Amino acid sequence: MSYEKVSQAHNICIGTKQTIKMVEAGKAETVFVAEDADPRITSKVVNLCNKHGIPIIYVDSMRKLGKACGIDVGAAMAASLIE
């Protein structure tokens, strides 16, 4: 499943602000977006990723994405970083 790729990533940033920062800085390799996250939050990141040519992987839920990132709360998005 797609969230297994998140847990396999070595360098990862979690959360909307951090993900946007990494995409804009050109440091994001792949962005993971929770399908049940608020579209008002995710649409900016999706547009930014499309503009920068960064692949987006959609994950079932915020809860699963958070768990895959190793945190106890849900996460709307996360990014694996270029090493």
Image (tube, rainbow, N blue to C red):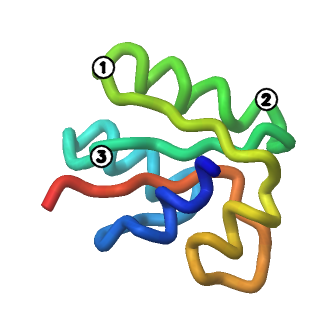
Question: Residue 12, located in which quarter of the rendered image?
Answer: bottom left
* Residue on which disc 2 sits: 39
Q: Amino acid at mark 1?
A: Gly
- Helix, strand, or loop for circle 2? helix
- How packed is label 3: few (under 14 Cα within 10 Å), some, or many (20 or more)? many
Residue at (29%, 21%) from the top-left corner? 52
Q: Amino acid at mark 2?
A: Pro
* Residue on which disc 3 sits: 28
What's the mark number on residue 53?
Answer: 1
Q: Is residue 60 left or right of residue 15?
A: right
Residue at (81%, 43%) from the top-left corner? 37
Dot 2 or dot 3, earlier in sequence: 3
Where is residue 41? Give x, y as percent: 71, 37
Residue at (59%, 82%) from the top-left corner? 70
- How packed is label 2: few (under 14 Cα within 10 Å), some, or many (20 or more)? few
Could you tell me how many numbered marks the image carries? 3
| Label 2 – label 3 distance at C-alpha | 20 Å
| Label 1 – label 3 distance at C-alpha | 10 Å
Q: Amino acid at mark 3?
A: Ala
Point out the frontmost of discs 2 and 1. Answer: 1
